[in-house]
Structures are given as structure tokens and as C-alpha cells.
Image (spheres, grey):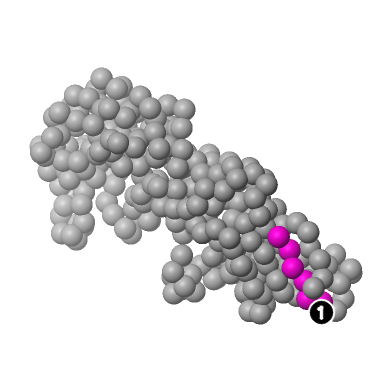
Amino acid sequence: MHEITMKMNADELILMALREDISSEDITTNSVMPNYCAGEVELRCKEDGVIAGLGVFARVFALLDPATVCEFTCKDGDTVRNGEVLGTIRGDIRVLLSGERTALNFLQRMSGIATYTRQIADLLAGSKTKLLDTRKTTPNMRIFEKYAVKVGGGNNHRYNLSDGVLLKDNHIGAAGGVAEAVRMAKAYAPFVRKIEIEVENLDMLREALDAGADIVMLDNMSVEDMREAVKLAKGRAETECSGNVTRENVARLVDIGVDYISSGALTHSAPILDLSLKNLHAI
């Protein structure tokens, strides 16, 4: 993650996580290490996966003490293996102990998302379809989770509600119909914004196309209907497939021909990648 982006957007979130874990002091660490002592600890991988978030991991310790040094043997996006030592962290032992859990929470979560994303992206390799994430992210973790998706080989959908127009079922209900929702969005949104609308069947699709939608999201439609939808939308709008897409079922969607497949599972269902800090000792 770019250093400027980190300082502008991530530091406050990292500090919030640290404050959550250390409201006044680390009683345990201060009990066994009352004074400064230089030390080092190893970052170890406990299962195969894709690493993501090393910069965030290092930033946790830097915010506690800028003198902390993290030296990694890998970079974000690399495949890592069970038993591999990924780096060494050196500094005040009190900082290494107090920052351990927060740093690992970020790195494990982000690496898990990158790993899960890579697995699905590999299943789509060779097709025209791009894999997208969603806004189904952990509160206050979106910047980290969407970064991890990119590291894993996926692509980011809109970052937040200010980032693009996506008319879903309840927006359509509020507007009074597909055509009216598209018309109102075109009238209100800046001309540089594309208009995407969710459709649940082919009749809604035809109405959205006639209204001039730029992107149609095919929500929980059958494979047969999606194939027909791609034909109908060709040359008129881009297509996105959405609805309970997971690693286990994405293969059935590969040859449909949609431009995008979005999956909330990338961020809400990816398990962590098991990592740990071991062999802490004074130097």
C-alpha cells in the first residue's frame, strides 16, 4: 500500500484498533518487561496461502514505536507456505508484545481474503470475466479488505455509496419501477457516472436496456437466463453476475460470457490465513 495512502487513510483506523486493545496499558507486558529491552521475533506462516497486508502489519509497530524495524522475506501477493519464516521484527520487546495481536489480526484477515480471492480468480483464468468484490465488508476494514482483494487478483467494485450509482431492488421500489429509477438516476447523477441497475428476470433486463442503463446486474438468475441476458445486452450494456457466488459454485459461471462476476464472499466469508509471531528473544 502506498505510504501516502497509508498515512491519509489507514493510520487512524490502525490507531483505533490499537486503542481497542490497549485502553490504558498492557498490564501483562508491563508485568514481565517493566523496562526497555531490545528484542526480535519471527513472523511465521502456518498454512499455505497468499500474503497481503505486510505494510499494515509493519505500520502497527511503527505507530507504537517508529524505531521498530520489520524485515520481510516476501511481498504482498506472494504465495507463502506452511512453516515458512516470512520476516523478522526487531525493537523494544514491550512494543513487540503489545502490538502482536493487532498486527496479526490485520495481516491474517487480509491474507485470508487475498488467498480466497486468488482461488476464485484462478477458476476464472482464461475467460473475459473479471472478478469483483462488494460493499459487504467488515465495518472500518473496507480499505484493507478491498486492497487484499486486489492483491489476490480480483478487482474492486465501487468503494462506497459516493463512488457510483447502483440501483438495487429497494431503489427500484422507491422510484416506482426500473425505467423510472434509471431516468431519475440519469437526471441526478453527474454525467461521468455510469448507471448500474439490478435485474431479476429478462423482462426487467429489457426494460433496463431500453431505459439506457450502462451496466445490468443479473441477480440470482438461472444460468440459462443469464446466457440469454448476455445476448440481449451485447452492444447495449455491460453485464455483471451477482448472487451467492462462492469458490464452490463459480465454475458454472465461467463460460456464460458476463463481463463481471461480483462476490460478497470474498470479504465476508474468507477464513483467515494462520500466521503467528514466534521465537521472541532479547538481542
Answer left or right for 131 relative to 237.
Answer: right
| Quarter of the rendering containing residue 57 | bottom right
Please provide the residue range marked out in magenta: 36-42
Task: Report which residue position mark 1 lands on.
Answer: 36
Looking at numbered disc 1 in the image, what kind of residue is underneath it? Tyr
Q: Nearer the viewer, residue 192 or 87?
A: 87
**Residue 49 location, x and y as percent?**
55, 44
Residue 265 in the image, given as x and y percentages of width and height: 47, 39
Camera-nearest residue between 86 and 98: 86
Left or right, 281 with respect to 137, comes to: right
Residue 41 lies in magenta, yes or no? yes
| Residue in view at x 64 percent, y 73 percent | 69
Depicted 162 relative to depicted 80: above or below: below
Q: In the image, residue 175 lies at what x, y percent?
A: 24, 43
Residue drawn at (46%, 32%) of the image = 247
Q: Is residue 55 visible?
A: yes
Q: Is residue 7 left or right of residue 192?
A: right
Residue under the image location 53 percent in, 41 percent down: 270
Residue density around tag 1, few if under 14, some if 14–19, many if 20 or more, within 10 Å: few
Q: Is residue 50 magenta?
A: no
Residue 279 to residue 264: above or below: below
